[in-house]
């Protein structure tokens, strides 16, 4: 191509970009709506099972509280969801294992109660089948290896019931893995911890490194034969929380085919909010009182903690965080490793949501924001769900290969 022709072509591209950036908002919204509602929109982390267990919550009815139910999922285009099987890290041993099985059963019961809307999925193909049938694919992830009680047989039973990822730790160190939430953040995987990773690979259960210590992350990355996920972690370069991932960690995760799913919790999105909340004696006192009042009802404790945070934001005692901060973290990760290694892991029903992302009905905003920031439709589809499905497929492939070798 001649130089003059190249200059002319570049001018046309520039003009096209300027026109696109000045496209009327309603036209962009229409494009975003079509893209969003035709895509697999997959959220890797939702704590709603606590509501099933403690409050007998039914997903079928639009609720005045919480972040997730079928009507709002339909409204927000959330058509694939990993429900988190979680109990407090202070609950250990047999009680923690029992709680996990109870939460799994409660989640499966929601599918049994709503067969017209929900379909239990354990593979990427089953997710796609549910989507083609207009159903919401329901998957499960165990949040915290403390629930296997140092027993690989429990892990196998989880997998048999449909669990397709396990977060290695929650907020406390385990006998076999270090947590980002505990004091000894230098602790990594023990030999048994490495056996856990190998068994997960064999079972097709994705290794989730949200919540783990940095040392555990790198140990797991070395051992795992399948790509890993960070099911609900944001970027430490923007918000310096131990739960978030450093740039080097994001690069290392991506180099082995993994995905970081951005968390929407405001304490992991905003450094200003994190600093203010850490300094606030009032917040800590009120949350502690709410925890005591809730007793064993972990769903109530989470709900009341979120209400207190929003009250203090409204009173000007804590800074407000806007929903666009989610897209800032997406942007940061994409600039580091490309759009193939970023996804969505909201922490709905388990965290304090930013202003404008009050529940899952608001999710189309993310698609529109990515379009406005110049993301291609193909890249947006990957971030919305395609990347996580790719990791699922890789985990399934590794599982089949390992099982074939063991025969």
Image: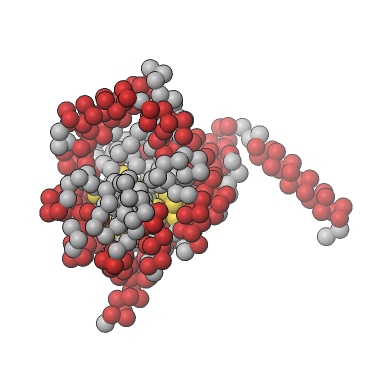
Vertical comparison of 271 with 45: above or below: above
Vertical comparison of 123 with 285: above or below: below
Q: Viewer-proximal residue, 354 or 64? A: 354
Can you tell which quarter of the image residue 299 is in? top left
**Residue at 86% of width from left, 55% of height from top?**
3
Q: Is residue 153 visible?
A: yes
Name the side, left or right, on which 333 lies relative to 92: right
**Residue at 12% of width from left, 54% of height from top?**
94
User: In the rendered image, which quarter contains the N terminus?
Assistant: bottom right
**Residue at 22% of width from left, 54% of height from top?**
146
All told, the count of numbered labels is 0
**Residue at 21% of width from left, 65% of height from top?**
152
Vertical comparison of 364 with 85: above or below: above
User: In the rendered image, which quarter contains the C terminus?
Assistant: bottom left
Residue 313 in the image, given as x and y percentages of width and height: 39, 23
Q: Viewer-proximal residue, 111 or 175? A: 175
Residue 282 in the image, given as x and y percentages of width and height: 31, 22
Q: What is the basis of the colouring in this image?
A: secondary structure
Q: Is residue 141 visible?
A: no
Q: Viewer-proximal residue, 366 or 9? A: 366
Name the side, left or right, on which 38 lies relative to 205: right
Vertical comparison of 76 with 195: above or below: above
Q: Viewer-proximal residue, 45 or 32? A: 45
Residue 400 in the image, given as x and y percentages of width and height: 33, 73
Residue 264 in the image, given as x and y percentages of width and height: 41, 39
């Amino acid at each position: 191509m001649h130089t003059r022709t190249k200059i002319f072509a570049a001018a046309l591209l520039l003009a096209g970009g300027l026109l696109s950036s000045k496209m009327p908002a309603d036209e962009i919204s229409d494009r975003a709506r079509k893209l969003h509602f035709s895509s697999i929109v997959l959220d890797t982390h939702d704590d709603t099972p606590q509501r099933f267990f403690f409050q007998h919550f039914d997903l079928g009815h639009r609720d005045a509280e919480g972040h997730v139910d079928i009507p709002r999922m339909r409204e927000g285009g959330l058509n694939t969801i990993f429900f988190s099987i979680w109990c407090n890290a202070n609950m250990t041993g047999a009680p923690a294992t029992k709680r996990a099985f109870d939460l799994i059963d409660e989640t499966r019961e929601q599918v049994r109660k709503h067969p017209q809307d929900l379909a239990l999925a354990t593979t990427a193909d089953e997710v796609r089948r549910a989507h083609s049938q207009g159903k919401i694919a329901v998957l499960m992830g165990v949040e915290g290896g403390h629930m296997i009680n140092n027993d690989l047989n429990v892990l196998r039973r989880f997998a048999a019931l449909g669990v397709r990822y396990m977060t290695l730790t929650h907020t406390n160190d385990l006998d076999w893995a270090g947590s980002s939430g505990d004091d000894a953040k230098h602790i990594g995987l023990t030999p048994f911890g490495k056996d856990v990773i190998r068994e997960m690979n064999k079972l097709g259960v994705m290794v989730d490194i949200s919540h783990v210590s940095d040392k555990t992350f790198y140990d797991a990355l070395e051992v795992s034969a399948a790509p890993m996920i960070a099911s609900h972690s944001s970027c430490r370069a923007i918000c310096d929380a131990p739960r978030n991932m450093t740039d080097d960690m994001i690069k290392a995760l991506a180099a082995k085919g993994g995905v970081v799913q951005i968390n929407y919790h405001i304490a992991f999105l905003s450094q200003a909010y994190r600093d203010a909340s850490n300094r606030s004696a009032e917040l800590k006192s009120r949350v502690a009182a709410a925890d005591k009042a809730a007793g064993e009802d972990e769903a109530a404790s989470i709900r009341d903690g979120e209400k207190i945070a929003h009250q203090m934001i409204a009173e000007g005692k804590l800074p407000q965080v806007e929903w666009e901060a989610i897209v800032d973290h997406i942007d940061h990760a994409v600039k580091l490793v490309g759009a193939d290694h970023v996804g969505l892991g909201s922490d709905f029903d388990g965290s304090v949501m930013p202003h404008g992302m009050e529940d899952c009905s608001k999710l189309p905003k993310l698609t529109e924001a990515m379009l406005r920031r110049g993301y291609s439709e193909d890249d947006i589809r990957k971030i919305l769900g395609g990347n996580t499905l790719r990791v699922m497929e890789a985990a399934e492939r590794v599982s089949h290969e390992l099982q074939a070798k063991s025969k």
